[in-house]
Image: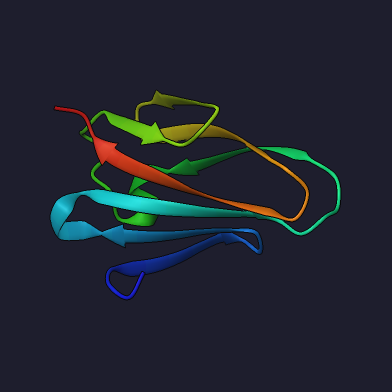
């Protein structure tokens, strides 16, 4: 978290990208008392990742990549946080 480029997708979703590794971590927060399912999309190039790679996201309930667009679904308990790892496939 002390390295890389910071991107705020919104108030509750933050990204830290390591450009030289073409990888990132996404922090998702739920400040509410009740569980929440967050589904969000972003453009890979918007967060400093190569749009020419295929990515896997560990820690997400699901993810789907279509070109430069990534859709992610994460399930959070009340007052919970999740860290998702974004890595280019091999």
Quadrant where the N terminus sits is bottom left
Residue found 45% across the figure and 64% down from its top: 7
Dividing the picture into quarters, in which one does residue 54 lie? Answer: top left
Q: Is residue 76 above or below residue 70?
A: below
Q: Can residue 51 be seen here? A: no
- For the point 34% across and 42% down, the residue is 86
The residue lying at 40 percent from left, 68 percent from top is 6
- Tell me residue 3's x, y (percent): 27, 72
Q: Is residue 84 left or right of residue 34?
A: left
In the rendered structure, the answer to whether residue 86 lies left or right of residue 64 reads left
User: Where is the C terminus found, in terms of image quarters?
Assistant: top left
In the image, 6 versus 36, the foreground residue is 36
Q: Position of residue 63 (x, y in %)?
A: 48, 27
Would residue 54 appear left or right of 32 to someone viewing this image? left
Q: Is residue 10 left or right of residue 30?
A: left
Q: Is residue 21 above or below residue 68?
A: below
Residue in the foreground of this view, choosing between 48 and 21: 21
> Compared with residue 69, is residue 78 higher up or lower down, i.e. above or below?
below
Count how many numbered circles sit on residues in the image: 0
Name the residue furthest right: 33
Residue 40 seen by the camera = yes
x then y, percent, for residue 61: 55, 28
Q: Where is residue 20 in the image (x, y as percent from the top left)?
A: 14, 58
């Amino acid at each position: 978290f002390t390295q890389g480029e910071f991107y705020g997708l919104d108030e509750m979703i933050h990204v830290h990208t390591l450009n030289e590794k073409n990888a990132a971590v996404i922090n998702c927060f739920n400040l509410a008392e009740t569980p929440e399912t967050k589904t969000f999309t972003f453009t890979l190039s918007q967060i400093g990742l190569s749009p020419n790679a295929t990515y896997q996201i560990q820690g997400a309930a699901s993810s789907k990549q279509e070109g430069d667009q990534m859709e992610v679904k994460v399930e959070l308990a009340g007052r919970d946080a999740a860290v998702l790892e974004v890595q280019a496939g091999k």
